[in-house]
Image: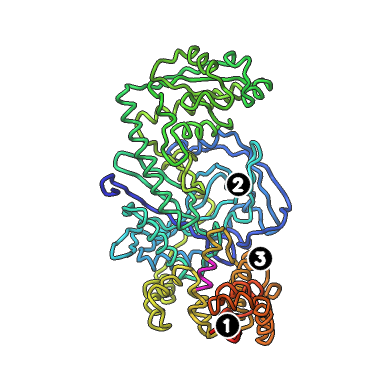
């Protein structure tokens, strides 16, 4: 299927580096959890590029009319506040980026130049992000296929979004400036599963440096997706590896649906023309609460007619999302709550009579649809102008745009795709010459490549290929090697990996690997039992220390006493079922002893005690 529709996917992998300082200042790369110590407010505006043009994505952000609130601590400085020029580059970050470049067989540049990339969504106080090209023409081999790596870049991470309150977006400055490595692939990927495998392979290369951060948000993927009759769309900021294939599948579904809608619109000779009409008086006696409340505050109901769109505005393009949802996403850019359209009415308290009145006012014909917005008059007008733009794009198919990933695998409109107009040289940072000696020194210290480590794990630790791959894919392969000096059984480590992956699916990560190592050391020394791991690892992921949560195991004698008591209380059941009573009574014992004693020990004692009184 994917070959027939001409699916092309390219990835951009962004990974935070675990360096001693930020990229352009000497502040720590640590995220704070305490209350911020100050706030500042800014408004950002677009600037002209070197060619005298303004980027379309920047213009789209300006339309939102937002104010940005920046929260900070004593661990950020004037560089993050854009009140002081950037400091010299972090050599540690540059060396790590060059190491990744060499592992991907990319060619390092002779001289590194810093570029400014206009970003005025509030995620950077300066209104731009600094980016450095480190290497080009890399190659990655996965499952016998070669994938191009056109660029490896180093950039500063953005401030992290905390909340949106009305027309204010709140960011925190502790993340701003953390070194971020960006690895881009050519659009060589042809299936959703391939994309996930490539992202995993690049992640393994990055982790091999031992210089990357862990946890939710420390690695993010941008997916560039297109099909033959569609357009390139970028899904920006995917954080869960397992959802990559889902996002691609859903984007393919969306683009195919939009292509079908375009064909139907062509057959109907549909058109889009300007003409926003005030239809407020059609709702003079409305019982629809949402409309009534806004009208009482002085708002207006404005509408547009979309000739030939009837039945298509309500057509599903992703699970639970319709063409009308795309119209609504565009309207929300200017701050309205959403839209009403004729394919979903009457509903929301809007009556048949009100629909008829609106249709008459807008001179609606058989195959026409209409869209309404209820808000302040100026805001409603701007929202419908955005809807008209999106409707015009529906006539040509799939618009090029940046989309935001949603937790369920769907996406929504974020802004237009940025263009070349947003890049221009950084004048505050001198270029950095990359000498042959520097490259040679980094080359000598390169870590083991993932596929080499996989083979070594299988032979050196007598692992099955499946177990070796699971450990390597977990990102805890270096922790695993340390546990082998503790004589921890590999099967126990596999159990730990399974628990950690389950926690990560819930958005819970162990960021303090020291605490994880302490837990594994106690497990190896039989100070904790494997049955307690679920509870202990969850608490470590929540930020607790192992010394405060370790459950001391009970003695064998105590286990025997508890099991005998349970057996005595269930003599009738044992006489009735015989040895078949082991399974149900094991559940009773585990409820009493979970996390305090080894499951095999409990089972052995229980079986022996039941055998004493079970009928032959």
The dominant secondary structure in magenta is helix
What residue is shown with label 3?
Answer: 543
Which element is circle 2 on? loop
Instruction: Give me the C-alpha separation between circle 1 and circle 3.
Output: 48 Å
Badge number at residue 108: none
Place of residue 249 in the rendered image (x, y in percent of width and height, measured from the top left): 38, 48
Place of residue 192 in the rendered image (x, y in percent of width and height, measured from the top left): 36, 53
What residue is shown with label 2?
Answer: 125
Instruction: Give me the C-alpha separation between circle 1 and circle 2.
Output: 75 Å
* Span shown in magenta: 495-500
Q: Quick check: is 313 in the magenta stretch?
A: no
564 to 408, vertically: above or below: below
Badge number at residue 614: 1
Which color mode does the image show? rainbow
Relative to 153, 300 lies left or right:
right
Q: Residue furthest left?
A: 4
The answer to which of 394 and 434 lies nearer the viewer is 394
Label whose residue precedes the other's in the sequence (1 or 3): 3
Place of residue 138 in the rendered image (x, y in percent of width and height, measured from the top left): 34, 61
Question: Is disc 2 surrounded by few (<14), some (14 to 19) or many (20+) residues within 10 Å?
Answer: many
Residue at horizontal 35%, vertical 31%? 261
Label whose residue precedes the other's in the sequence (3 or 2): 2
User: Would you identify the image quadrant in which residue 201 lies?
Assistant: bottom left
Place of residue 101 in the rendered image (x, y in percent of width and height, measured from the top left): 40, 64
User: Would you identify the image quadrant in which residue 546 lies?
Assistant: bottom right
Question: Is disc 1 surrounded by few (<14), some (14 to 19) or many (20+) residues within 10 Å?
Answer: some
> Are dots 3 and 2 in contact, CB under 8 Å?
no
From the viewer's perspective, is the residue at label 1 or at label 2 nearer? 1
Label whose residue precedes the other's in the sequence (1 or 2): 2
Instruction: Give me the C-alpha separation between circle 3 and circle 2.
Output: 30 Å
Residue at horizontal 53%, vertical 59%? 505
Question: Is disc 3 surrounded by few (<14), some (14 to 19) or many (20+) residues within 10 Å?
Answer: some
């Amino acid at each position: 299927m994917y070959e027939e529709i001409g699916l092309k996917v390219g990835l951009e992998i962004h990974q935070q580096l675990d360096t001693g300082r930020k990229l352009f200042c000497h502040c720590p790369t640590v995220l704070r959890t305490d209350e911020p110590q100050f706030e500042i407010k800014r408004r950002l505006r677009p600037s002209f590029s070197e060619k005298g043009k303004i980027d379309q994505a920047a213009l789209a952000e300006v339309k939102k009319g937002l104010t940005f609130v920046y929260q900070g601590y004593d661990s950020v400085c004037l560089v993050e506040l854009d009140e002081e020029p950037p400091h010299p580059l972090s050599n540690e970050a540059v060396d790590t980026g060059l190491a990744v470049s060499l592992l991907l067989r990319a060619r390092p540049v002779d001289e590194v130049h810093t570029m400014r990339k206009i970003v005025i969504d509030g995620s950077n106080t300066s209104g731009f992000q600094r980016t450095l090209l480190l290497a080009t023409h890399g190659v990655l081999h996965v499952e016998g296929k070669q994938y191009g790596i056109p660029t490896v870049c180093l950039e500063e991470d953005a401030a992290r979004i905390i909340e949106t309150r009305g027309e204010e977006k709140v960011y925190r400055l502790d993340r701003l400036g953390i070194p971020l490595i960006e690895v881009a692939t050519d659009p060589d990927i042809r299936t959703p599963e391939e994309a996930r495998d490539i992202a995993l392979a690049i992640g393994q290369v990055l982790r091999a440096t031992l210089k990357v951060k862990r946890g939710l948000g420390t690695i993010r993927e941008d997916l560039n997706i297109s099909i033959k009759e569609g357009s390139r769309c970028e899904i920006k900021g995917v954080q869960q590896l397992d959802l990559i294939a889902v996002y691609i599948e859903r984007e393919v579904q969306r683009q195919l649906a939009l292509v079908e809608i375009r064909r139907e619109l062509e057959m109907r000779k549909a058109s889009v023309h300007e003409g926003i009409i005030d239809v407020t008086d059609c709702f003079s006696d409305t019982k629809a609460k949402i409309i009534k409340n806004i009208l009482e505050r002085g708002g207006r109901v404005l509408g547009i007619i979309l000739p030939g769109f009837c039945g298509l505005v309500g057509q599903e393009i992703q699970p639970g999302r319709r063409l009308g949802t795309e119209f609504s996403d565009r309207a929300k850019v200017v701050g309205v709550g959403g839209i009403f359209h004729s394919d979903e009415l009457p509903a929301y308290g809007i009556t048949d009579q009100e629909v008829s009145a609106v249709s008459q006012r807008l001179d609606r014909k058989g195959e026409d649809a209409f869209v309404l917005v209820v808000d302040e008059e100026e805001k409603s007008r701007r929202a419908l102008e955005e809807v008209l733009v999106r409707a015009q794009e529906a006539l040509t198919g799939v618009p090029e745009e940046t989309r935001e990933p949603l937790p369920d695998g769907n996406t929504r409109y974020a802004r237009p795709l940025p263009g070349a107009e947003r890049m221009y040289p950084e004048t505050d940072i001198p270029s950095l010459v990359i000498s042959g000696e520097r490259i040679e020194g980094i080359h000598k210290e390169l870590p083991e490549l993932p596929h080499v480590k996989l083979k070594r794990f299988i032979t050196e630790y007598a692992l099955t290929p499946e177990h070796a791959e699971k450990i390597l894919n977990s990102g805890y392969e270096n922790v695993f090697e340390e546990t082998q000096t503790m004589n921890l059984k590999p099967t126990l480590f596999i159990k730990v990996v399974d628990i950690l992956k389950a926690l990560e699916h819930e958005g819970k990560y162990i960021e303090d690997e020291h605490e994880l190592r302490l837990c594994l050391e106690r497990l190896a020394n039989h100070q904790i039992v494997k049955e307690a791991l679920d509870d202990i690892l969850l608490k470590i992921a929540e930020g607790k220390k192992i010394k405060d949560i370790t459950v001391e195991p009970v003695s064998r004698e105590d286990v025997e006493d508890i099991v005998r008591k349970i057996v005595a209380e269930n003599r009738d059941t044992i006489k009735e079922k015989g040895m078949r009573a082991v399974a149900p009574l094991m559940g009773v014992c585990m409820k009493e002893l979970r996390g305090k004693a080894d499951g095999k020990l409990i089972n052995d004692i229980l079986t022996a005690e039941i055998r004493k009184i079970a009928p032959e």
